[in-house]
């Protein structure tokens, strides 16, 4: 069991990195608490696999420390770290039976056969692999092979954490939810720290209690799925989480408020002070489509928009609006009137966020 801490960690694949973009991992601090179910979510190339490989010891970071339960493990090879890693493609021995594949890590540690059998049966039970224990691994389907791969990670009782690197990539969509549920059960039963890497927000939020969103080699927010939705700490989180993502509008500071196009919006004195302190930074107003509301012309903060088109998604609709040349998305529920032509919308204060150079101004 382990708490995994990353201290002043950074990594570059280049021999002489200079600019921030030379780093696959930009200097960061992070803690994965013992027993947590976490996701590491981000687009392709943001550094997810690099980070996992640093934790498991497959890669030495250019800078900083990896600590397990407060102890530095940088010098320890992967096999000494007691971390199981499950990759996109199953790593199993095709010519061995499922049983022997599962037993392999324990036999490697010279465990006695009674113990091997007890652990293999326990893991086979939870992964529903008993009916195929005596089949050769090469006869299995892709999802069965991936279950064996996961089982090999789980079978050792000295495993401190399991790192899953997009483990469901090769699995049929209809089986994905089943395996995801299995992972959740495994987490509850074994109380192991689990970090699940994915670029799919649905996968991340169904598996994890807390999600670390990665962007350009940095964890830009670490929070519950709800926090990421309601309170994005970075414009990338606003854009990446949600479907469609947050509306992001460049704004300029004016005396007492902000302006975009011909629209002026006043701010509370407090909010104004905080934005003024960041003057010179690129200022952006963010609001999620779910929080944009239809208004009437008499509402004080109503803004005129043109309806471009309405996309019907069954139980709700996404309305594509033109706000002075800006593209704004608004979600409306089934029972709401469908706007047409020129209409009015509002951004309720409670759901408007401001960002300076992409980070939330709080
Ligand atoms: N062995 C390597 N040598 C040089 N550059 C690398 C190497 N591995 C990764 N990179 C670069 O480091 C950055 C982060 O890559 P990484 O594979 O960690 O991202 P990722 O988020 O896991 O992406 P994906 O989801 O596509 O696997 C990318 O710019 C990538 O091109």
Image (cartoon, helix red, strand yellow):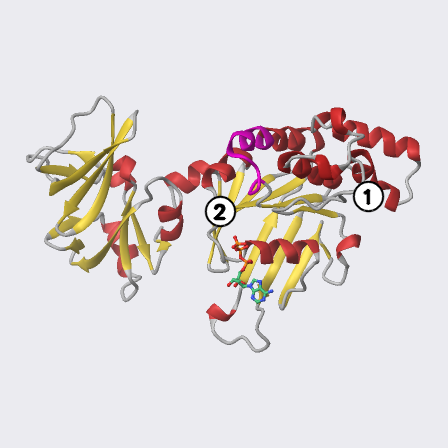
In the picture as drawn, the residue positioned furthest to the front comes out as 139
Query: Residue 171: within the magenta?
Result: yes
Residue 335: quadrant of the picture? top left
Task: Tell me if I can see residue 263 in this picture.
Answer: yes
Disc 2: residue Cβ within 8 A of ligand 1's nearest atom: yes
Q: Element type at marker 1?
A: helix
Residue 116: quadrant of the picture? top right
Q: Which residue: 60% across, 50% down?
A: 31
User: Foreground: 72 or 203?
Assistant: 203
Which tag, 1 or 2, sits closer to the chain's start? 1
Distance, label 1 to label 2, CA atoms, is: 29 Å
- Give the vertical position of 83 relative to 121 (above or below): below
Q: Which percent across, then down, holds residue 244? A: 32, 41
Please give the residue where the numbered disc 1 appears in the rendered image.
Answer: 105
Please give the residue where the numbered disc 2 appears in the rendered image.
Answer: 199
Q: Is residue 24 left or right of residue 349?
A: right
- Give the vertical position of 71 relative to 100 (above or below): below
Q: Is residue 215 left or right of residue 135?
A: left
Q: Element type at marker 2?
A: loop
| Range covered by the magenta-colored residues | 168-180
């Amino acid at each position: 069991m382990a708490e995994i801490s990353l201290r002043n960690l950074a990594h570059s694949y280049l021999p002489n990195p200079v600019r921030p973009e030379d780093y696959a991992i930009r200097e960061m601090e992070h803690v994965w608490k013992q027993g947590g179910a976490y996701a590491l979510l981000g687009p392709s190339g943001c550094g997810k696999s690099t980070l996992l490989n640093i934790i498991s010891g497959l890669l030495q970071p250019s800078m900083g420390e990896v600590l397990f339960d407060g102890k530095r493990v940088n010098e320890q090879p992967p096999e000494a770290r007691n971390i199981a890693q499950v990759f996109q493609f199953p790593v199993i021995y095709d010519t061995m039976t499922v049983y022997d594949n599962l037993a392999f890590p324990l036999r490697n540690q010279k465990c006695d056969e009674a113990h091997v059998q007890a652990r293999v049966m326990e893991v086979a039970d939870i992964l529903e692999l008993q009916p195929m224990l005596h089949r050769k691994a090469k006869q299995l389907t892709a999802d069965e092979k991936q279950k064996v791969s996961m089982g090999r990670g789980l079978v050792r009782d000295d495993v401190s954490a399991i790192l899953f690197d997009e483990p469901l990539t090769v699995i049929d969509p209809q089986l994905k939810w089943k395996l995801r549920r299995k992972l959740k059960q495994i987490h509850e039963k074994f109380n192991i720290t689990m970090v699940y890497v994915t670029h799919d927000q649905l996968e991340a939020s169904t598996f994890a209690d807390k999600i670390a969103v990665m962007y350009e080699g940095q964890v830009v927010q670490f929070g519950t799925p709800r926090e990421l939705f309601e309170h994005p700490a970075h414009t990338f989180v606003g854009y990446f989480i949600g479907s469609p993502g947050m509306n992001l509008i460049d704004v300029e500071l004016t005396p007492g408020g902000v302006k975009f196009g011909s629209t002026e919006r006043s701010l509370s004195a407090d909010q104004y002070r905080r934005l003024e302190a960041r003057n010179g930074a690129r200022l952006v107003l963010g609001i999620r489509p779910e929080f944009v509301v239809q208004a009437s012309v008499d509402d004080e903060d109503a803004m005129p928009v043109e309806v471009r088109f309405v996309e019907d998604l069954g139980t709700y609709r996404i309305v594509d609006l033109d706000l002075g040349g800006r593209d704004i998305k608004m979600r409306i529920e089934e029972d709401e009137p469908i706007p047409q032509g020129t209409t009015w919308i509002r951004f309720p204060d409670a759901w408007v966020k401001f960002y300076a150079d992409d980070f939330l101004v709080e």
